[in-house]
Image (tube, rainbow, N blue to C red):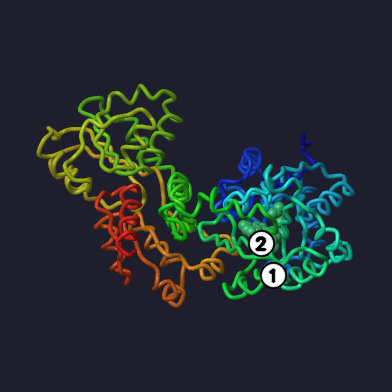
Amino acid sequence: MNDSKTGMVFLIGAGPGNPDLITVRGRQLLEECDVVIYDNLIPDELIVTLPERVERRYVGKISSVHKLPQEEINALLVSIAKEGKRVARLKGGDPFTFGRGAEEASELRENGIAYEIVPGVTSASAALAYAGIPPTDRRKASLVMYVTGHKGTACESMVQWDWVAKAKFSTIVIYMGVSQMGQLSDELIAHGMSPDTPAGVIERGTFSTQRVFTATLATLPALAKEKDVQPPALIVIGEVIDLKDQVEWFSGRPLFGQRVMITRPADQAEPVYRHLRDLGAEVLSYPTIATRECADLDGWSRFDRLPEYNRWLILTSENAVRYFVDQYVNRYKDIRKLSTFKIAAIGYGTARAMEHYHLSPDFVPSKATVTTLSREMIEQLTLSGANVVRVRGNLADSTAEDALSAIGANIVPLTVYETFTPTWPENLKEKLFRYLPDFIVFTSGSSADGLVANLSADELNRLSGCKVVSIGPSTTKVIEHLGMKVTVEATTHSIPGVIEKMIEYLHAQR
Ligand code: SAH
């Protein structure tokens, strides 16, 4: 498929906005590529969750101004592919539907670069599905037209609106037409289309903040103006709009319309993102901390030499489990060798991660804090002379180590991961302030610290109207120490606990 000297370009449709609507093929290629080149309408989550080694290049548009002219994007694709790299060129919706995909493909062909087109769910298909408007229906429409409302090229300005206006039993979907809505409506009416034809507009389709307005061909422009409809939006014209009230499904979800900012590390956040989206929320993925493996040579060499009696392993986080098991299996090749250890663990995330590896704890304290863990271990177990490995991240304090070595345990701290502040993709901060979150969720104190590290005081101030959600008291303490006010605190200190409280809060407000 690809020789070592020349790379290959994949023109991938990212879908309309909801990151779950990329194809399986697109998703796989994204994870395997060397460089991703992406536009403005690409779901941020697809970029934020990329493996760290993937290079990201933003070539998107800001408002209607091209950030990079198309010729330069073409040239960039060619030059990166010529370096021998696999390039994922990610485009909104479908690359071949008003996406200039063919222009990029021709340029690649001219330069002898191999490419593949990965189709995407075009916004007409997705936004109508999420609005509850079927483009075809045996009772109402047997012809669908995708038309551009933009008059940028000669071809675009020569749309035969007279012909479009005459089509019966049809659905017209107009891309890029919001700013021209009045003229488009006048033109269709002038060419004989009934002013009473049902017409609607779908703004930010598939996002939880999607807005759908329906009216008639004659009245839609005024309604859209009154509601201040902004791009990206599609205009839909046709009798199928009347089916909306019967088949619409999306807006009834409990978190519909809510923008929820998630600050936890991207590699642990996908189940959270999905859970929230299933409930109708729009997820804003802004990881403020990230972790990576670190090699504690001294710790592992002490681990290797640990006497084989009364061995304990202390696991206090999902990361500790994940990074420890990976490194352990790498070193010892066989998980069964771990059976010489008993395991003491705290926390919901830790338990979930252990389950994942088919491990279960031998000791769980009555409260999920490190202080309680070490106190109750000392009270209930015989640990003098025991060989205890405290698995930890680089930021953990030495509470457990101090308490256990004080009673004569042989304690080995083993640092398996380190925490760092990830840099956000170029356009992410700008978007944060354009579409402010309703909720900011912190699932650890360090994610709150990370937000403060990523933003200036002035920027933080602009977020002061957002509701802050904390997973529990110790996170709340950090948040408050940073000068933010907590609106909702979970009683069950887990992600489901956080989400439950948010829904409860919204119910109480309604
Ligand atoms: N290739 C893209 C279209 C790019 S043109 C596709 O296949 O969808 C950009 C236009 O697409 C916007 O002006 C708007 O009309 C439409 N669009 C893109 N995303 C949209 C969304 N989430 N909701 C409504 N319209 C959208």
Q: How many marks?
A: 2
Q: Are marks 2 and 1 in contact (CB under 8 Å)?
A: no
In the structure shown, which secondary structural element does the residue marked by tag 1 occupy? loop
Q: Residue 192 lies in what quarter of the image?
A: bottom right
Identify the disc placed on residue 113. Answer: none
| Residue 373, percent from left and from top | 19, 43
Q: Which residue is mark 2?
A: 199
Front residue of 46 and 397? 46
Q: Residue at x 68, y 53 (%)?
A: 124
Alpha carbons under labels 2 and 1: distance apart? 8 Å
Q: Which residue is mark 1?
A: 218
| Residue 460, percent from left and from top | 42, 72
Amino acid of disc 2: Ala
Q: Is residue 480 above or below residue 236?
A: below
Quadrant of picture, ligand 1: bottom right
Q: Residue at x 16, y 42 (%)?
A: 366
Residue 397 visible in the current orientation: yes
Q: Residue 202 lies in what quarter of the image?
A: bottom right
Q: Earlier in the sequence, mark 2 or mark 1?
A: 2
Q: Residue at x 43, y 50 (%)?
A: 279
Question: Quarter holding the C terminus?
Answer: bottom left
Crowdedness near tag 2: few (<14), some (14–19) or many (≥20) residues, C-alpha within 10 Å: many
